Structures are given as C-alpha cells and as structure tokens.
Image: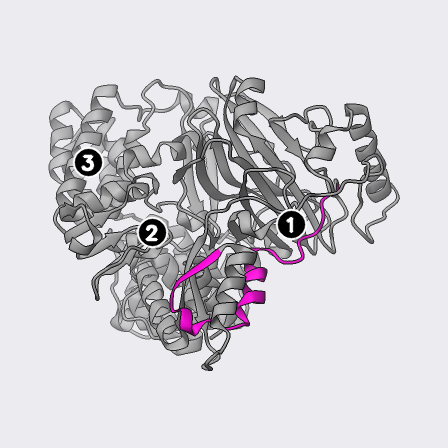
Amino acid sequence: MKIVFKDFLFNKGILVNDYNREESCTFEVRFSLAYLFAVNVTEGIEKLDRSMIPYVSRRLGENVPKPFYNGFPQSVRELSPDALLFDQLLHYTRTYGLGCFDGPGYSVMEESFERVAFKEEVTPKKFICLDEKEAEKRLFGYVSDMLASTRPLAPAAFSIVLDYIREYGLVPERIASKHTVVCLLDELRDTRLVKHLYLSDVLKLVEEIQYNRYFSSDIKRLNFKNADRKFISDVLDLIFAEGYLDVRSCYEKKALWAGLLHHIHYKPRCERAREFINLMRNHGNESVYSELERKIAEGDIRGAVDCLVEGKGQGALIRSLNYLASRASDGDVDYIISRLDRVKPLLLLQMLVRFATYDTEGGPRQFGFIRQGLYHVHRETGSEMKHRRSLLSEEKAEKLRSAIEERFVERMKHRLGRVYISKEMYDVAVPLKAAAGSLGYGVLPSGSRMHIGEGKKIRGFTYWEKVYDIDLSIIGVKENGKRREFSWRTMYASQSEGLTFSGDETSGYNGGSEYYDLDLDACRKLYPDVKYFVFCNNVYSDAHFNECICRAGYMMRDTEDSGEIFEPKTVKSSFTVDCDSSFCYMFAIDPWERRFIWLNTSMQGDSHLAVEGDMGFVEDLVRMCDIMSVGRLFELMATEVVSFPEDAELILSDEEPEAPEGVEILRSCDFERVLAMLE
C-alpha cells in the first residue's frame, strides 16, 4: 500500500501490515510501541510487524531538532531579560546580519543543563492493526464518504482521493461537490467526469485551472496554453451534447462567458452550442438574479422568493435569507420560511450556525469563507456599513434561527436506529470548516474542545526543514477583543512560570524547532485579562508552508523537565502544515474553563506575522459545540439512544468498546462519515 494511504489511516488510529508475512515477535513489537510511543494496539495484534516501530516514530516525531534553548523550559526561566535579549540579538546578528545560515543557532548565555529520565504517566493512544486487504476496504469507505459530501475537501484530503483514483482506477459514480469534480477534472483530464457538471460549472473549472496551473485567481485575464483551450472546448462539447444546460445561471456571469469563448476560440458543433454563444454575446440578461432584483425593486418579495426557488432551488433561497428577510415584512418572512421545506440538512446546519452567531447590534460584520483550501476573512469597511441595508432586527434573526433549527431537526430525526453515544462526543464539533484544515493524528474538527486535567501543562511545538525561519507564537485574546502578543518580539521580557518560550530559531533550514509551555494555573494569576491563548504558526521567511517541510502539534505534560523536550509518548496530536499560505491558527486554550479548543484553520494571506490576521472568527469556533456537536447530531438521528454499547446498532465513541459483530463504530476522527450522513 502506498505510504500516503498508510499515513492517512494512521491518522484514524489504524496501522497497516502490507508485508503479508507472519511475525514471531508480535509481543515484542506491541511492547515496544507501548513503551516508546504509548501506542496500545487493541485489535489485530497478530498482524503487528517490526517495521511499524520506525514508522510510528516518523509519524509522531523522529529526530526532532533541538530548540534554541536546549534546557527549555527550566533553563530559560533562570536567565534574566537582559541575557535573553543579548542571546537573541547575537543570534539575529549572526544569521541575518552575517548571513550564517549553515546550521541552527543556539544560546550562548544558557548554562549546561542535564535532563532527568522520563517518568510521567501517560494516556495510551489506541490503535488497531489491519492487513492490506482490510485496510483497502476501510480506505475505500473513507474515499466514498469524501466523494459523497457536498463540502469542498481540504487539499490534503483531496490528495488522498486523487491518489486513490489513480492507484485503484476508480471511476466515481457520484461526486457531490462541484469543487471536487473540477479539481479532479483539472488533475486527471478524464472527460468521463464531465457528467457530474452543469454548464455553469465550467467557469469553476476554468478558475481552478487558472489558479492551479497559472497561479492566478483572476479569470478575466486568461492566458491558457493550447492544451488547456482544447480541454475546455472538449468539456463544452460533451455538455452541449449530453449535459445539463442551465443557461439562466450562465447569464449571471455573461461577460466572463463571452471572454472565455473568445479566448479558447470555441467553435460550436451543435445548434444548442451556437444558440448559447449568441445569447452570451448579445445584449440582455435573463438571469434569475436579474429578475429577483426587479421584483424586489417592485416590492414583490414573495414573487422574488418564487423566482429564486424555481430558478435556482431552495439552496439559493436559504443562502439569500438575510438579504431577502431584511427587505421583507413579517408576513413575507413567514412566506420565505414556508418555502424552506426541502433544503439539505448540511446547508441547514451551516445557516443555523450563521444565525446562532448573528450580530444585531449594527457593528462591522465579519464574513468568512473558504477558497482554494484557505480561510478568508473580510470585515466590513466604514463605507460598506454606511450603505448596508441588510441588518436584521433581533426578532427577525431569532425567528429565522428557530425556523432553520426546526427544519433541521425534522430532516434529521429518526434516520438511524439504536445509537450509543459516549460523553466525549458532545465536545466534538461537526466538521463544517474541514476544507481549510490540516490532516494528522489527533486532529479534530474546528471548534471541538477537550477538558484539560488538573495539573496538566500544554507544550505546543513546531519543527521544520527546507526553510530558515518558522515562528510559533501565542496571541492572548482579551474580553474586550484586544490582544496581547507572546512571540519572538516580546518573550525576552515576558518569560514566566505561566508561559515559557524555547527561543526564536532563524537558521533552521536543515532542521529547526520552537516550543511554548503553558501552565493554566499560573496563567490565570499572571494574565487575568486573557480569555483565550491562541497558538499560531507562521513562516517568517519568504515562503509558504507547502514549499517546506513543517509539522506541528501539542503534548500534554505533567512534569516539564521529565525526559526530552520532545517526548513522543506525550504527543496528543502531530500533523503536517502544508497550506498555500504563510500562517495558520492551530488551537486555543481557555485557562478559565480548562479547555483545549481546536481551530485548525489555514488562513489566506502572505503576512510574516500571525498577529496581523483577523481573529474574530475564534469566538464563533469556540461556540460551535454549543450550537451543534456530533453527539447532539447523532442524538437527533437516533430512534433511541441506548446506555450500553452492546445494545446499539451504531456506536459513537473513541473508546473502542466491545461491539456486536457488524455494528459500525464511529470516532471523533471520522470527519468524512459524519459529513456524508448530513447529505
């Protein structure tokens, strides 16, 4: 089995034996995995192979470079601010001033430090072991679920689907997401996939080719090669011959269509194609949205609603809900709600989240959307606020929220039989923002939260190669929305028992690392005005994460100086950061509620400082589980929630409970299956 598939299954707690040989040392392998990495194999012990020991080491962290302060954290706290500042200035002078990038720099002020032997109690990581045939069956299920979801895939998840299709020759019968279809078409150039597109989707394909192959998102300025022109022409020919011609939707981007047809020198081969070209080149606009605006201008809100539903479907109606409701009377709002009877559950849930966090105060709104695997944030400008007409009253917003929730519950109820739900699943968020996240072991959906035990300390980490300078930092978010920065720029004067930084490594091309230790009890005393501590990762060098090798994650520690700085046993999550951007938000810590909150969001932009990004979305993610958790979702779908796993027809748990044969077990890492159930 290809290593990319084995790595993907490892993220799900699955080890794969693809050597097809019997081992005589399975006990020794199991013991070594437990002793070295706290990996407890609970199923398929007889399939364990000695090659799994170095493999697990690579996945959880192998040969991790030493940080700037080798005695971190204790030795750092023993240095004065002057010594810390001198260390960093000397280091910066050496690397940036003298251009010495040949090897990582280390402290000259730090005294020698001898670490004690590792002596902590750790929580085992539960894994199962499968042979190659069983693993391929699991992998097919995950890929099928990803193809069944209407949500765009994260770049890493899309790579799994693409590699699977290439490796196993899969020709998907159903691909629910248009974004996934156009990405596969661009990569594979397999025109058999055209059957999954409408005519209006061709512009999405053009946009993907422009971004993926020409590194531009502006499709008004195309400069395709002849091979791309011919490919788009072939796609159009197939759609005109056999596909769905949603011409009214094409009117919405009439100028772009005219430009595209001219650029590719398209020659129609049938009457329908010739007619379409004439429509796109002539005057007049018969798009649904043009008619919608005419009816709104006439004060005919109900007519506008009917026009939108008949022309674009109920999905378009619910996406325009705020726009229409802000211009509607109370009676018209009731009519709008009455037309929302067949909206897909996933879209209902997205809108439920939006209205549950709706701000009726009239301040600047913040809009977040995912594009090309990155999260974009736009905050309204003063001019936009001045001309805004779509602010809803508190009463209207609540009315819409209640109506959406009622329809969502109605659509989801009794989809399943008897379900067992473990307690921790009520703190796992539904993976609505997975398209902008990273994949890796221990990664949960954005907004998921975990309780941090008493006395536990968080050690966030990042390590890298093939780029000189990556910065790990923490942003303290206060109640009033202001921030406090804990980064390489401030930590020479801010090291404390609550927050300790391992030093700024700026010459780590051949291997660099940075760490932060966070002690919750001390942080509450030292920083009483900080509501959340947000861990960020950003590339300071002139590069994106996908141009280097970078891993990040966190450990849960009892004793800071027990064992090595990087102890695989204590790693709770380790993932690859490979987004086409220079910064990302990884997770947040709530010291007051003692909660760890997954953010896992790759942000659009080229900033060298993570602190410059807009962090208003953090509050929305923190509330995700209160709006709808995975536990609550399956509670809605269950005909009956049972108290014991042995009574269930479906089990929702990370504990790998004993289950009757044939009963499906879903875990918090099974993003794909959860989303597929929402379709």
The residue positioned 31% from the left and 44% from the top of the image is 425
The disc label shown at residue 622, or none = none
Q: Mark 2 vs mark 1: give the one in front.
A: 2
User: Mark 3 belongs to which amino acid?
Assistant: Glu
The residue carrying pointer 3 sits among few (fewer than 14), some (14 to 19) or many (20 or more) residues within 10 Å by Cα, namely: some
Taking depth in this image into account, of 613 and 445 the one nearest to the observer is 445
**Which residues make up the magenta segment?**
39-68
Q: Which residue is mark 1?
A: 463
Taking depth in this image into account, of 501 and 198 the one nearest to the observer is 501
The residue positioned 22% from the left and 25% from the top of the image is 398
User: Mark 3 near mark 1, Cβ–Cβ under 8 Å?
Assistant: no
The disc label shown at residue 655, or none = 2
Which badge, 2 or 1, comes first in the chain's sequence? 1
Residue 625: name its quadrant.
top left
The residue carrying pointer 2 sits among few (fewer than 14), some (14 to 19) or many (20 or more) residues within 10 Å by Cα, namely: few
Residue 174: name its quadrant.
bottom left
Coordinates of residue 502 in the picture (x, y in percent): 69, 38
Kindly tell me whether residue 266 is visible in this rendering.
no
Residue 448 higher or lower than 186, as above or below: above
The disc label shown at residue 405, or none = 3
Asked if the magenta segment contains residue 523, the reply would be no
Kindly tell me whether residue 147 is visible in this rendering.
yes
Coordinates of residue 560 in the picture (x, y in percent): 62, 37
Which badge, 3 or 1, comes first in the chain's sequence? 3
User: Mark 1 belongs to which amino acid?
Assistant: Tyr
- Count of numbered labels shown in the rendering: 3
Cα–Cα gap, marks 2 and 1: 30 Å
Work out which residue is located at the far right of the displayed protein and give it: 98
